[in-house]
Structure formats: structure tokens, C-alpha cells
Amino acid sequence: MRPYLNYDQVKNMLPQKYPFIFIDQVIEVEPDKRIVCIKNLTGNESFFQGHFPENAVFPGVLIIEAMAQSAILLSKISLGEENDEEQAFLLAGTKSRFIHPAFPGDQIRFKTELIKSTKLGGIVSSSAWVEDVEIAKADLTFAISSKEKILV
């Protein structure tokens, strides 16, 4: 199955840059509704060197970051502003639960559903899956502003 967005398209849409991009592909999208994204974990990821050297585990905070990035992609696609580089997306709140760890070699699927959206922000419900095991879930609230307004 061909991805809806490949890695190069994803990295061009996200405001985050290497090494802080945690979405490799978008495999499904329904604008204004939901998105499904993939992150392939390899043992070469730099954060595994310190988290943890004897038992590598994908950090929970990076799972939340990947969920937030999936929300940014869904928002940009839904608003038709895929290439708007002047937008700043700010995580305003999160309610999360971690259920199971993820390890090198895992492929994480992020399923993110839009609960509410405006030009100024939104609320999403997101879950992370490795195969058929849910490893985390979160409700995220984010704000959308212009970069100009937050760099004051």
C-alpha cells in the first residue's frame, strides 16, 4: 500500500526538523476527521543511547510528541494549509496514559481523531499501537498562532 504522505512530504509539512520528526508516513487520512501515521523504531535512534542503555525503551514524551505531530498534519490537511510555514502549533494541554512500552524494531501506528477544530486550535484524541496492542492514548489540546506572535 502506498502511503498518503511519504517521509519527505511529512518533513516538508511539519514545523519540527531533524532530529525531532517522529512521523515516517501518513497511511490514511480523512480531512476534518482522522489520520493514521507510522513511526518505525530502529536501534540507531539517538535517544536509545540514554533511554535506557541496557534496555532501550521509546520515551513516553516522544510518543506524545508523535501524537502532536499527527495532529499538526491532520490540522494542516483539513485546513488546506499544508505548506503554511508561518503557522506555529503549540501544545496547550494533554491528558495521557501509557499502557505498554515500545522498543527498537517496533512499528508504531498513531491513530488520531479530531474532536474539535478552529483556525485558532483544536482538540484531538490519539492512540498509539504496536501491531494489535495499544501502547498509549492521549487527549491533546493545541493552539495555532503565527510565528510572528510567539517570537515577541
Image (tube, rainbow, N blue to C red):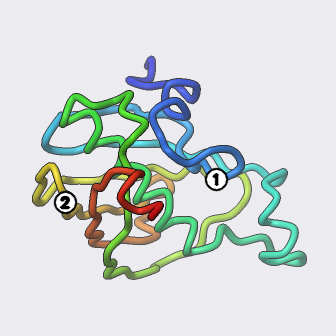
Determine which quarter of the picture holds residue 85.
top left
Q: Nearer the viewer, residue 107 or 91?
A: 91
**Circles 1 and 2: CB atoms closer than 8 Å:** no
Amino acid type of the residue tagged 1 in the rendering? Phe
| Position in image of residue 46 (x %, y %) | 82, 58
Residue that appears at 28% across and 42% down: 74
Give the SS element for disc 1.
loop
Amino acid type of the residue tagged 2 in the rendering? Gly
Residue under label 2 = 122
Is 87 displayed left or right of 43 in the figure?
A: left
User: Badge 2 local density, few (<14 within 10 Å), some, or many (20+)?
Assistant: many
Determine which quarter of the picture holds residue 83.
top left
Residue that appears at 80% across and 66% down: 48
Give the SS element for disc 2.
strand
Residue under label 1 = 20
Q: Is residue 140 above or below residue 15?
A: below
Q: Disc 1 versus disc 2: distance between alpha carbons?
A: 22 Å
| Position in image of residue 23 (x %, y %) | 53, 44
**The C terminus lies in which quarter of the figure?**
bottom left
User: Badge 1 local density, few (<14 within 10 Å), some, or many (20+)?
Assistant: few
